[in-house]
Amino acid sequence: MSDELRICVIGAGRIGLPISVSLAVKGIKVVSLELDSSKCEEINNSDAPFFEEGMDKALFEAVNNGMLVATDDYSIIADCNVIISAIGTEISEDGEPDVSSVDPMVAAISPYLKSGDLFLLKTTLPIGSTLQIGNKLSEASNLALDEELFVAFSPERIVEGRAMEELRSLPKIVGGVGPKSSIRACQIMKIFGGRVIEVSDSSTAELCKLIDNSYRMTRFGFSADVAAVSWRNGINAYEAINAANQDYPRNDVPLPSIGVSGYCLTKDPYYLSAASPEVWSSRGFESTWIAARKAGDWQVQEAKARILDFFENDPKGKKAIIAGATYKEEVDDIRMSHGIELARMLGDRGMEVEFWDPIVSGTEIGGIAVHCDSGCIRGADIVIFTVPHSEFIKWASKPHGLELMNRQVIFDGWGIIGDDFPETCKVMGTGKP
């Protein structure tokens, strides 16, 4: 089958590029269609524009073997028979789905579609969108939907940092706008590896995507509120949750944190709630996953309030080191970072803020320096852990440099500070009294 395939992946971001590379290393010719010409140049020079475990070597081989090329020219679609969309969608400030990136893409690819083409969407979409897009493409190209033009949705379920491995191993859900579209899309998704699960239609597949992250967020939001209750009652939430989970098959409660985010985990709960707003309006309260998303986000506000309270609401001139500028551990993505959000909040109150982050060190973020190691805690009044990078966990087990701090204060946003931490240091944090 690979001899017949010519695949175009639209978008060379943190989903699209791993997809392109994964297909290329399996011997399939892939075009990465990316409107950022500088990113195209990087890819064509075998340079990954971001870090993903296991991708650098695979990208180098794919480009140098002629199996992967990047371009910003939509006309390349005329030479392809499978088009995969991995472009991003957003949420508006009021929490509504923002799919304004989709219509320009549909208009751009329509002139180049041919009979037999498959258009496979992996972009997060409101329920029912794939069928609407399929109808637009069919009308614009004059190709009969599910007869000449095949359109399907297959939710992307990978997480940053494990994309290459998870593309091979995770189950792939597929739903087409019709039975022939489903069959064709299943054939393509089998190439990656892992089980392929065919569902009834594209709307069901879209719902599966929104379930994944909304369910995760619901669990995290539960833990966030347990943390809020715990510290107010002088209880260590980590001890309580670990004890509640231990050898008890009906519990699998996540440990709390200062906040969880990410491109999809943040927006997908809002996309799911937008599918039936009349439900929440008629009953008078919001969905569980939106409440959970807000509870998770509120932990940053909790952290700010506790830090300011510790400094008796007079933090001006105090030096804070925020350990973690990325949004999660071991990735170089700073979008939706709780550390950056907290830095802004504390900076607005007059604190001197700097970052300690080995993953994105040597840069500035919003004019704030990012340091590579713990030497930056010299003269600090507080160190605030906002992501559990492995280097931070290692430091927490054998802390050094505490004596160089102006005040030995730690805010532990991820539960990485153990009970054996030096008693000379004041430790507080999310879910900790």
Image (cartoon, helix red, strand yellow):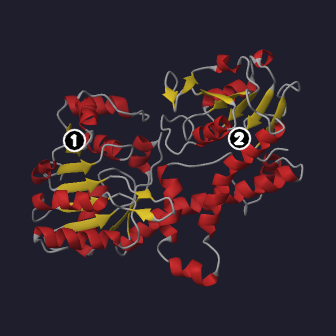
Helix, strand or loop at mark 2: loop
Q: Quadrant of residue 14?
A: top left
x and y percentages locating residue 101 in the rendered image:
31, 57
Q: Nearer the viewer, mark 2 or mark 1?
A: 2
x and y percentages locating residue 399 in the rendered image:
75, 22
Q: Quadrant of the C terminus?
A: top right
Residue at 81% across, 23% down? 407
Q: Is the C-beta separation of discs 2 and 1 under 8 Å?
A: no
Q: Residues within 10 Å of mark 2 (few under 14, many from 20)?
A: many
The amino acid type found where label 1 is placed reads Gly
Going from N to C along the chain, the mark reached first, 2 or 1, is: 1
Residue 307 appearing in the image = yes
Residue at 58% across, 78% down? 280
Q: Is residue 267 above or below residue 278?
A: above
Mark-to-mark CA distance, 2 and 1:
44 Å
Closer to us: 213 or 25: 213
Residue at 71% across, 40% down? 413
x and y percentages locating residue 430 in the rendered image:
75, 45
The amino acid type found where label 2 is placed reads Gly
Circle count: 2
Q: Quadrant of residue 97?
A: bottom left
Q: Quadrant of residue 253?
A: bottom right
Q: Residues within 10 Å of mark 1 (few under 14, many from 20)?
A: some
Q: Which residue is mark 1?
A: 27
Q: Is residue 352 above or below residue 189?
A: above
Left or right of 347 in this view: 34: left
Q: Among all residues in the image, which is located at the extreme bottom?
A: 282
x and y percentages locating residue 249 in the rendered image:
73, 61
In the image, which disc is placed on residue 413? 2
